[in-house]
Image: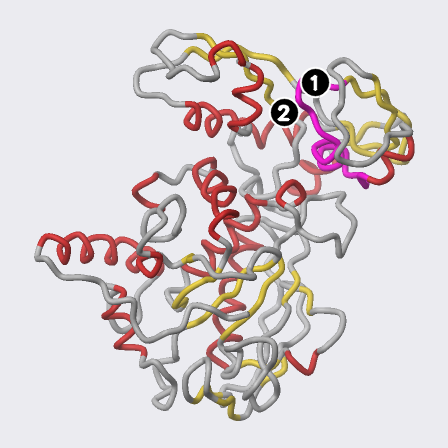
Amino acid sequence: MLVLLAQEASAESAGQQVSTDPMCRRWIDETQLLEEPEWIKHTVAPKERVSQLSARYGVKREDIVEWNKLKHSRVSLRKGRKLKIKTARVPPPREELTHVVVEGEEWFDVAVKHRVSTKDLRAWNYRVRSKPLKPGQELTVWIDPGFPRTVNCKRGTPPPPLEFRKDAISRGRPQYGRLKNGILLPESPLWTRRETGVNVLWASSHTVENLEKAFRSLRVDAGYDGEVIIGSISRKRGGRFPPHKSHRTGKDIDIRLPLLPGVIPNTYPRPDVVDWAGLWELIKALIDTGEVSMIFFDWRLQKHLYKAAREEGFTEEELRPVLHWPRHEHKWEAIVRHSHGHKGHIHVRFLCGVDEDQCGPSRARTLLRRGWIDPQPSGKESREGALERREQWKKEGRTLDEGDEADEDE
């Protein structure tokens, strides 16, 4: 058996910066990559699931089920059970540790710190699950240094720039407008176009420009190399696009939720197979263009996105103007807001371009309504400026109108 530290070697040989984050270092340094897949024995840790094993070993859930004659992929696994898995990737095993609660910590805070689910954390500590945490209390935590770290471990290689026309223009509102001189979304290593229906992948120049900017940040700065599928945008000339109510002007894009490594392509993105860290970095990169008006995503699934963002170091205050969750009301105050039918994908709507004077609602009006900085804010300025202005408006007794843009799409 030949063991290769291929991840670190390939990153350093390519001149890429490797993260100093301890979890990234363990994932890179301690994961053994084999020349050929071999059979290994895995000992099940408490509350471990087939979907987690699929991700950590880079194999299909269905194969694990078949190899071990399980009833189905969602079966409960008994602690200590031995499973056979054929893999070319052998990560370090799960580890049990003791966490000592400090002043002000809650269950969620401990879960975020160790990158585990709150549900599992409570289950491991069932004797105190219904009680508030107290300073000095000891909790059992099973961490998984073998779970794939798909973002912020190393920088990616910059792809060649896209070449596209600059005369594709959005006209009218997302629900009633058209697309002039539309551009077919170019093929690129940055994304994957949907397998069928390229006739609905037409966009404005402003949209393509900012999609490239966001995906370049995702691939290079965050180092994400998983597949991201672009679905519907608009028809060639815009206009009606059933069953969507919008997608008429080339600035509304459906992006499928990215999947964890090892998940079968085209698997429906249920929460346990979604790469939430990758999705958060994608949304962050989109917002950081300063050109996103809003993003539609089911409220109940935003809790996974919120936790992924917290695990990447973002605070509750920083996320407040970005995510609708955990609030129930005033969804228009957040960039990522609830809309029915958006569970397997996010729907991204860009602002009208600076030169798109027939596009609606107007860029200036949208920015003013959201409290953003006009005319071309960076993502950071957008978030911080919006939060500051909204707080001032509330002190003055101003109310944030829900505005002119319809939130429902499907």
| Label 2 residue SS | loop
Q: Which residue is mark 2?
A: 144
Name the residue: 61% across, 37% down: 149
Residue type at tag 1: Ala
Q: Do we see residue 215 in this rendering?
A: no
| Label 1 residue SS | loop
- Residue 288 - label: none
Question: Residue 71 versus residue 223: which sits nearer the camera?
Answer: 71
Q: Are marks 1 and 2 in contact (CB under 8 Å)?
A: yes
Name the residue: 51% across, 31% down: 21
Q: Residue 363's spot in the image, x, y percent?
A: 31, 77
Q: Residue 280's spot in the image, x, y percent?
A: 50, 49
Residue 91 vertical placement versus 404 (above, below) = above
Quadrant where the N terminus is found in the figure: top right
Q: Is residue 246 magenta?
A: no
Q: Which residue is mark 1?
A: 45
Q: Residue 215's spot in the image, x, y percent?
A: 55, 61
Q: Is residue 86 left or right of residue 208?
A: right
Cα gap from disc 1 to disc 2, whole angstroms: 10 Å
For mark 2, does the 10 Å Cα neighbourhood hold few (<14), some (14 to 19), or many (20 or more) residues? many
Residue 221 vertical placement versus 188 (above, below) = above
The earlier-in-sequence mark between 1 and 2 is: 1
Residue type at tag 2: Asp
Q: Is residue 273 left or right of residue 362?
A: right
Question: Residue 324 versus residue 249: which sits nearer the camera?
Answer: 324
Q: Is residue 122 left or right of residue 44?
A: left
Name the residue: 45% across, 43% down: 306
The quadrant holding residue 393 is bottom left
Q: Which residues are magenta?
A: 44-61
Q: Residue 231's spot in the image, x, y percent?
A: 64, 69
Residue 342 vertical placement versus 300 (above, below) = below
